[in-house]
Amino acid sequence: MKESVKLTQFAKSAGCAAKIGPKVLAEIVGGLPKFFDEHLLVGTETNDDGAVYQISDELALIQTLDFFPPVVDEPSLFGEIAAANALSDIYAMGGIPKIALNIVAFPNCLGQEVLGEILQGGAKKVQEAGAVLAGGHSINDEEPKYGLSVTGFVNPKKMWKNSGAEPGDALILTKPIGTGLVNTAAKADMVSETSRKLAIGQMRCLNYYASEILKDYEVHGCTDVTGFSLAGHALEMAEGSQVTIKIDTKKIPFLPDVEEYAKMGLVPEGTYRNKEFLREKIKLNDTIKESFEDLLFDPQTSGGLLVSLKKKDAKEVLKRLQEQEQTRYSKIVGEVEEKQEAHLIFL
C-alpha cells in the first residue's frame, strides 16, 4: 500500500445521514411488522446484542452482524477491529462464534492490495476466535466498509441477555471508553501516541477473554458497549431489567487524554446524536462538566462488556479480569438498585 493513502480519509462525513440517529431508527424499526416464532428467544424487543433461535433444549443459535467505515488508516488493523467488533455480540450473550461471513463495500480506486490486507486482518480475528470464515459478499462503493455476519451457539439455559440485571448486583466494565474521541483526534492529527496505541489495542482485543472468565459465575445481564455509548447501553440494560443503574463516574476506566480531546471539541458526531436521544432519559450529577458528559455519550468501537452480576462475586471476578493482560483495565463501575424515578443515574 502506498504511504500517501490514508484509509480514514475515504470515510465520508455524516451529511444527510446525520438525521438518522437512534431516535429516528427506533421509530422506523417500531413501524415494522411484528414477527412471532415460539423458538425465537431473543428478537428486537429489548435491543439485545443478537437474535437467539432455539434449536433444542441444549442448543440455540445466535445471529448477528456489524460493519462500518475505517476508524484507523492501517488496512489490516481496520480489518481486525471491525471483525472483533462483530464477533463481540456473540460473547456478550455468553455464546461461542462458529461461522463468519465477510461484508465488504469497497471503492476500486483503493486497489486489491488494500482490500486484501483488510480481509487478512478480519480473518486473523476469526481464527483467534476459533470460528470458521466461510465466504461473504461485496459491493462497489465510494466509501469502504467492512464487517462480519456471525453465527454462534449458546446453551439457552445459560445465555446472557441485556435485560436481566437485578437489584443488589454490581456492574463491571471490561474495557476503557473513549475510542470515539481518540479516533476523531487521530483524524485531525492531534492524538497522542499513548492514547492511540492503547485505543487500537483495546479495539482489536476480542471480548472472548472477558467472556470466558464470566462464564464461571452467575451473570444476570450483559451487553457490549459500542456505538450507542456507555450511557445508551447502560440505559437499555436498566430499562429492559426494570431497575435503576447507578454508575460512579470516578470509577469508569477511560483511555488517556480523552477529556482533553473533548475540551478541544474533537467530538464525533455520534456523540451529539446519542446525547440528543438519551440526555432527557438519564440523570447526571450537577457536578459533571459538559466535556465529561461527552465521554459518557461517546460512541465506542469494539468496546468492552458491561456486566451485571452478584455483588458477592464482583471482587473475585474483577481480580481475575485484572490479572489477565487482555482485560487488565476492567473496573467495578456501579450497582443496580430497585427502580427509581430515573433508570440510569451517573454520580
Image: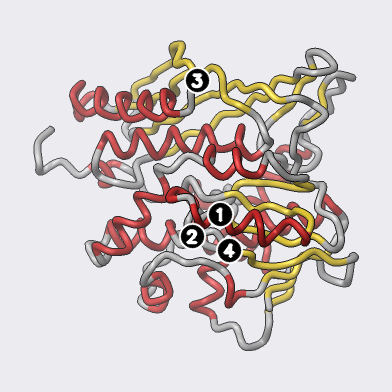
* C-alpha span from label 2 to label 4: 6 Å
What amino acid type should be assigned to the residue bearing mark 1?
Thr
SS under mark 3: loop
> What is the crowding at mark 2: few (fewer than 14 residues within 10 Å), some, or many (at least 20)?
many
When asked about the image quadrant of residue 336, the answer is: bottom right
Q: Decide if residue 211 is on the left or right side of residue 58.
A: left
Q: Position of residue 62 (x, y in %)?
A: 67, 25
Q: Secondary structure at mark 2?
A: loop
Secondary structure at badge 4 equals strand
**Pointer 3 local density, CA inside 10 Å: few below 14, some 14–19, many at least 20:** some
Residue situated in front as seen by the camera: 14 or 69: 69
Please tell me which residue lies in front, 209 or 23: 209
Q: Nearer the viewer, residue 48 or 202?
A: 202
Question: Residue 58: where, in percent of width, then height?
Answer: 80, 18
Specify which label sits upstream in the sequence, 1 or 4.
1
Which residue corresponds to mark 2? 329
Q: Amino acid at mark 4?
A: Lys
Residue located beneath label 1 in the image: 174
Looking at the picture, does residue 331 appear above or below residue 57?
A: below
Q: Which residue is mark 3?
A: 131
Q: CA distance from mark 1 to mark 4?
A: 7 Å
Res 85 label: none
| Type of the residue with mark 3 | Ala
Q: Residues within 10 Å of mark 1 (few under 14, many from 20)?
A: many
Q: Is residue 340 left or right of residue 69?
A: right
As measured in the structure, the alpha-carbon distance from the residue carrying label 3 to the one carrying label 2 is 26 Å
Real-space Cα separation, disc 3 to disc 1, in angstroms: 22 Å
Disc 1 + disc 2, Cβ < 8 Å: yes
Q: Are marks 2 and 4 in contact (CB under 8 Å)?
A: yes
Residue that numbered label 4 is attached to: 331
Q: Look at discs 3 and 2 and give the one toward the viewer.
A: 2
